[in-house]
Image (cartoon, rainbow, N blue to C red):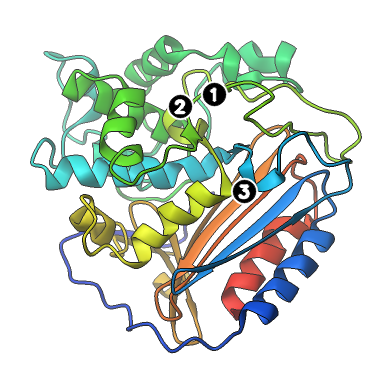
Amino acid sequence: MTTRTAPTALWPTAPLDDPAPAGDPGSAAEDAERLEAAVVASDAPDTVFALSRHGRRTVRSGGTAPPPGAAREDLRYEIGSATKTFTGLLLARLIRAGRLTGGEPAVACLAPGRGAGADPVTLAHLITHTAGLPALPPGFRARALPAWRTNPYGRFPADRVVDAFLRHRPHRRPGTRWRYSNYGVAVLGHALAAATGTAWEELLTGHVLRPLGLAGTALAPEGPAADAVGHTKDGSAPVPPFDAGGFQAAGAVRATPHDLLTFLEAHLDPDGSPAADALRAVRVPVLRRGWDHRHVHTIAWFRHPVDGGPMYFHSGATLGQQAFLGFRPDTGTALAAVCTRRFRAHDPFVAGAYALLAET
């Protein structure tokens, strides 16, 4: 997707303009009723809707399949592209710690000594989807085709992602157009690892997961006792656990609903968190695009206006699971929703989760 007007890219230094949280407008019973309705409407084998309002949690789960061996809310779910919110926070933490600026050319990180050119793709371009890269790297579809319905990303490992980038010439000058790119964020993960001399998994664990106390979050499958099982679009058949291949920074995270709420609650109330500065930074708009600049982004979240103030959100999907994460500072509310069914046309899950948070 491209924009009709050039984006205005800023790095997050401005103060937050979000309003203070309003008083609690809903009761626990009302929240539970809304969540139960959302679970039923999702029509998936396993579904969990977890809501936090001023720290009060309400969780409802269910599904069309028989209950798994463990409680649905205790399983880890693949969150797909919502992983990018973790990667954005990681980058913000590295910037706040003075280890990076965000302006580093990705080529300089991945191939030291190689010239970056006049208009290099920077780390900031990669996280904001303004690097001029396509959604997927050249050659991806041909290599992934034999596993297109099982695990296409697993056939494109890290070295191929990096090599494709180092050979690539952007079709547009970086920073001039927005185009959502799993490829770009994947490259960012490898650039962060190269620039710091630390594997992405170790970076994310040390700078995000451990400081926020996310013990129920993993970066690879950990077996049927811990992980939810994904299903096809109609929910009739299971699919293998997702293999992110070289796209870890774009889609590898799997987490329990309670961990996802903890992650979101940290964004709502950064005070006292070891990641406080970065949590505030990822709420600041850095990009406005489209007609009248109506589409607003931070380095981690989509940001939409709702009555009372902005709503931050990101969704994600793998071949057999879906996730929606969002929070509203004006109402002190966060929502983590997950389900085990492949995304389908006119899917009720993401639309229902978005509407629930927007109206809550």
Q: Is residue 281 above or below residue 44?
A: below
Crowding at dot 1, Cα within 10 Å, few <14 / some 14-19 / many 20+, comes out as many
Alpha carbon separation for disc pair 1 and 3: 16 Å
Residue at 58% from the left image edge and 75% from the top image edge: 358
Residue 302, given in percent of the width and then of the height, sits at 45, 60
Does label 1 or label 3 sit earlier along the sequence?
Answer: 1
Q: Is residue 199 toward the left or the right of residue 104 in the image?
A: right
Alpha carbon separation for disc pair 2 and 1: 5 Å
**Residue 174 in sight from this viewpoint:** no
- Residue identified by numbered label 3: 323
Residue 234, given in percent of the width and then of the height, sits at 89, 41
In what element is the residue under mark 3? strand
Residue at 71% from the left image edge and 43% from the top image edge: 71
Q: Is residue 74 above or below residue 16?
A: above
- Amino acid at the residue labelled 2: Gln
In what element is the residue under mark 2? helix
- Residue identified by numbered label 2: 248
Q: Is residue 181 toward the left or the right of residue 227 in the image?
A: left
Residue 271, given in percent of the width and then of the height, sits at 23, 64
- Amino acid at the residue labelled 3: Ala
In this view, the residue in front, 136 or 318, is: 318
Crowding at dot 2, Cα within 10 Å, few <14 / some 14-19 / many 20+, comes out as many
Crowding at dot 3, Cα within 10 Å, few <14 / some 14-19 / many 20+, comes out as many
- Amino acid at the residue labelled 1: Ala
- Residue identified by numbered label 1: 244
Q: Residue furthest left?
A: 98
